[in-house]
Image: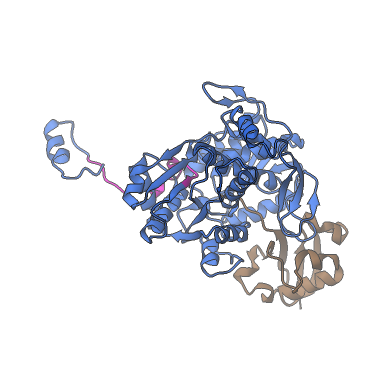
Amino acid sequence: MAAVTIKIPTQLRDATGGEGTIKLEATTVGTALEALFTAHPELRSSLTDDNGDLRRFVNVYLDGEDIRYGEGVSTPVADRQELQILPAVAGGC
Amino acid sequence: MSATALSCRECGSEYPLEAHFVCSKCFGPLEVKYAAHPSAGDPEAIKRRIQAGPRDIWRYADFLPVDRVPALAPSGPGGSAGLEGLPAGSTPLVRADRLAERLGLREVWVKNDAANPTHSFKDRVVAVAAARAKELGFTTLACASTGNLANAVAAAGAALGMPVYVFIPADLEEQKILATGIYGANVVTVRGNYDDVNRLCTEVAGERPDWAFVNVNMRPYYAEGSKTLAYEIAEQLGWQTPDRIVAPIASGSLFTKIGKGFQEWIDLGLLADGSTVPVMSGAQATGCNPVAAAFQAGQDVCRPVKPDTIAKSLAIGNPADGPYAIELARQTEGTITDVTDDEIKDGIRLLAETTGIFTETAGGVTTATLKKLADAGAIGGDERVVIVITGEGLKTLDAVRGTFECNEIDPSFSQFESNVETRTEVTV
């Protein structure tokens, strides 16, 4: 198991009691999120759909890299890595 | 048609008209919801009200999410500027017969949004976002930008007397950086691509709630400004819709809001009987084509890509409104096409030499897409097509460097005759 940190966006901090970062242990992005949902159950419905998949407007980054460039939720995590959850927004036209 | 709430596009949850951009229940994007227009049922009255308005986007204030139209001081014939912002919009819609002829099309029009105050369509969206930001009491403007937005926000901040922070990729075109810093903005160059900048700004916006990030926490208001492109095109065509729009797609916001603008006016009966939303043809660069790729593969979700294209203003690898752009293209039996960097350069040249309009790389993408559709026979022989040119060629000069030769001579008539005039084709 690797010790990772998850950064929680401000919009979801009501569900974490105001905490902006959560430290937990996991082997993949998916198990990290599962551990997060176990600790803060309200986040599950905010971030995943009825099938348990991440909603399409949820972006998850592992050390700044979108997990969709890797293996998605199956992407392995290592000690001291940081997961960041952010809503999809964009500029451009 | 006053704004009543922010509504989640995914689950319909509603929020007050404040600086929210994401649904806290499902993370979906928020969009402005309006009450019925006070003159609904009387299209002629609505048209008269529009026509009596100023010659800028505020003639469409009834369809925009602000409580009060900014007070703009008169500045010469037909314009307004100064006190509370820059006069965006009312850009030319130019009939481009030589371009149409070159491509074997019946009728092509160019909506030249390079004619805005900072030379891109971004002045429209920034005008709306900044006006709403002031109403909400914000004192600082900010944005994540691929360049044009940085120019527009920096200029708007200068006009409004508000400090500005712009975050841009460090490798942006020099012209766009220069045309931002000159307004006194704080320019933050981020070592990374636009998606890295955007990720940073989404985080900063959460941590600096007193800043109005025009395309993050002000995004629902900002995005509505793009509807004015549709309104103007319809009004300039004599209250009609064209048969087809060709417009660039980066995040997909502009593309979808053009469709929304036409639909709103169709619903209010402002447009000719039988009007429908035009066939919507989206344009992307092959080096950053997540929306085109998903559309062509029959998918609804865009897989992010790492951009590698000269069209930097369209280089968004993770397009937030991509799914909605795909939906709109399908609903209107449209297309989403991508073109290579060489085609983009040819597109810039084609537009310039047939219309006198010099566009940046994004406009090259749009023009090249028009050509590609025409070459493939995808545009009907009786169609009236409008292409949306979103920015100015002087901002991306590198894209055209080396695409033609000059004739250097001594100051002598004989050299002129022998070196220039005798050539069968002058290639200056």
Residue A82 place in picture, x, y as percent: 72, 65
Q: The chain shown in brown is which?
A: A
Q: Is residue B307 above or below residue B90?
A: below
In-front residue for pair B218/B178: B218
Residue segment shown in magenta: B387-407
The residue furthest front is B273
Is residue A79 left or right of B147 when viewed as pictured?
A: right
- Magenta stretch: residue B314 in it? no
In this picture the colour scheme is by chain
Q: Is residue B180 visible?
A: yes
Within the magenta stretch, is there residue B402?
A: yes
Residue appearing at x 75%, y 73% in the figure: A52
At 51% from the left and 22% from the top, the residue drawn is B77
- The residue located at (63%, 25%) in the rendering is B72
Residue B343 x %, y %: 38, 56
Q: Quadrant of the N terminus of chain B?
A: top right
The blue-coloured chain is labelled B
For the C terminus of chain B, the quadrant is: top left
Instruction: Give the vertical position of B162 relative to A46 (above or below).
Output: above
Residue B383 percent coordinates (x, y): 43, 51
